[in-house]
Amino acid sequence: MTSPLFSRTVTVFALLLAVPVLVVLGSLFTPQPELWAHLFDTVLADYVTNSLLLALGVGVLSAGIGTLTAWTVARYQFVGRSVVQWLLLLPMAIPAYIMAYSYTGLLDFAGPVQSQLRLWFGWSYGDYYFPEIRSLPGAILMLSLVLYPYVYMLARTAFRQQSGSLLEASRTLGLTPRQHFWKVALPVARPAILTGAALAMMEALADYGTVQYFGVTTFTTGIFRTWFGMGNQLGAAQLSALLCSFVLLLLYLEQWSRRKLKFYQQGQKQQEPTRQPLTGVAGLALLLLCLVPVLLGFVLPALQLLGWASDRLEQLFSADFIQLLINSFSLAALTALVTVSLALSFAYAKRLSGHWSLALPVRIASMGYALPGTVIAIGVMLPLAALDNSIDLWAEQQFGIRTGLLLSGTLVALVLAYSVRFIAVALHSVEAGLMQITPSMDNAARSLGESPIGVLKRVHLPLLRASVLSALLLVFVDVLKELPATLLLRPFNFNTLSVRTYELASDERLADAALPALAIVLIGLIPVILLSRALDRSNRGAK
């Protein structure tokens, strides 16, 4: 049993993390008919249409790329397969907005691709058609190239866990390998694929940097315009609530779509499926098929960034760049420590007491990852600004002094927003580690006189070292890449790598934006490499 004080403390912190979401949803109870009449007459239809098309396009394309590559590496043996299976995760290291900047530099009129075409064929402006990368289809492509690994990871695991007896049964029924994929393997893996596609769609709805740079009007760009362009925080909150309802509806539809999809493996040891060996042209074709997403989603943008950054390496030692690194690193490290500490407390409290009064607030708090950074930023800003105003008014009445912005204009707001956004990432890693620790160890320690906190410090923390380290690293890199919440909540004159990259790219200084963008990509490679190693270990353990 957990102590009442510890239980109440965890509940309070969980409810604190739930406040931003509740504030955003509560804004709907304050009518603003003039604002909504203006939005209905002008841009709301574009917000809804573009957001839905963006999410749907990213979901379909990510599901297609992720499922096809997952089936290829799970069911076929070809030259280079062992390397390709982790190379397919590399696009996760590149934020979508950095991908957008890189491809704009490659494909716009002055870029190397069109310049070379004009040189080869003697064309001039207007003599040829070239697809416009700064468009809704371009945004769908950019986001899909960095988000398909969500589907790939889940689908790959689902395909590998399917018993080889399923394939043998299909053969005895006269099904060809193609028919087996469509009629057996794909339906069985459908829950995992839908989950990955839903994650990709939620990330697409949350994106700001890509759609803003490409000039695509979505809910996220509308929230920024309403807040900063119209100076209407409440209106921005109500737009955020509408976007939040779209995300929650997507989560509901994802669960509803697989409500009847329940597939169970037999209790006995499964027959592991044997990968079909392919050599020659067929094997080479599969290798190229898997390399295309890696080439488009990582190699080309990384080479573009390297080419731009190579002419500006002297900036590595400039005071401004060093300050960006210090700001980004310190903010990400502080947030990672706070978030993982909260996640550890939540997970341990749930382990000690599974009562709904404790589990429900934790569950609500962990929903933040499904919400866009803009929504969370507004949900954080409104209550903190109200609290700052109350403190300022009280201090002026009592002591005749003005306190100013104590919370909403400081790093406190940023850390709180990041914690709400990424607590689920840390919680998932910590809970996975706790599940591997048998409760008998807790009972043994308690029988020796240890308190619950003592059990956590002396028994669990040493065993959770790998899980806690993974959670710290994942949150650290996620904070480093986060753009919308940072743009909305950062203190004055406080820049990070992501913000500086966005500012330079927005001014069309793509080459100058390369160095901070490349720093984000290189740091983002760390969790991708660790994730690929973890997947390899889990797959070996399943054999």
Image (tube, helix red, strand yellow):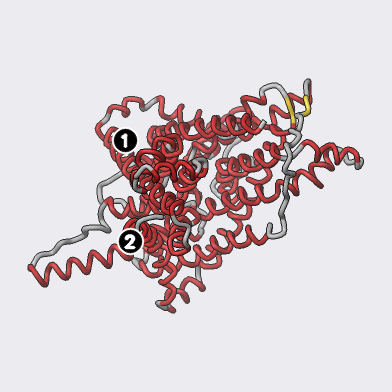
Q: The residue tagged with tag 2: helix, strand or loop?
A: helix
Using residue 458 as the reference point, say whether residue 59 is left or right of it. right
User: Toward the viewer: 204 or 464?
Assistant: 464
Residue 260 showing in the rendered view? yes
**Quadrant containing the C terminus in the rendered view:** top right
Q: What is the three-letter code of the residue carrying label 1?
A: Leu
Mark linked to residue 381: 2
- Mark 1 lies on residue: 325
304 lies above or below 405: above
Residue at image coords 51%, 58%: 217
At which x and y percent is residue 112? 53, 31
Residue at image coords 34%, 54%: 416
Using residue 371 as the reference point, say whether residue 193 is left or right of it. right
Using residue 246 as the reference point, say whether residue 450 is left or right of it. left
Using residue 309 as the reference point, say whether residue 86 is left or right of it. right
Q: What is the three-letter code of the residue carrying label 2?
A: Met
245 lies above or below 80: below
User: Toward the viewer: 131 or 18?
Assistant: 18
Task: Kindly indicate the quadrant of the structure image that contains residue 270.
Answer: top right
**Quadrant containing the N terminus in the rendered view:** bottom left
Cα distance between the residues tagged 1 and 2: 25 Å
Residue 422 showing in the rendered view? no
- Label 1: few (<14), some (14–19) or many (≥20) C-alpha neighbours in 10 Å: some
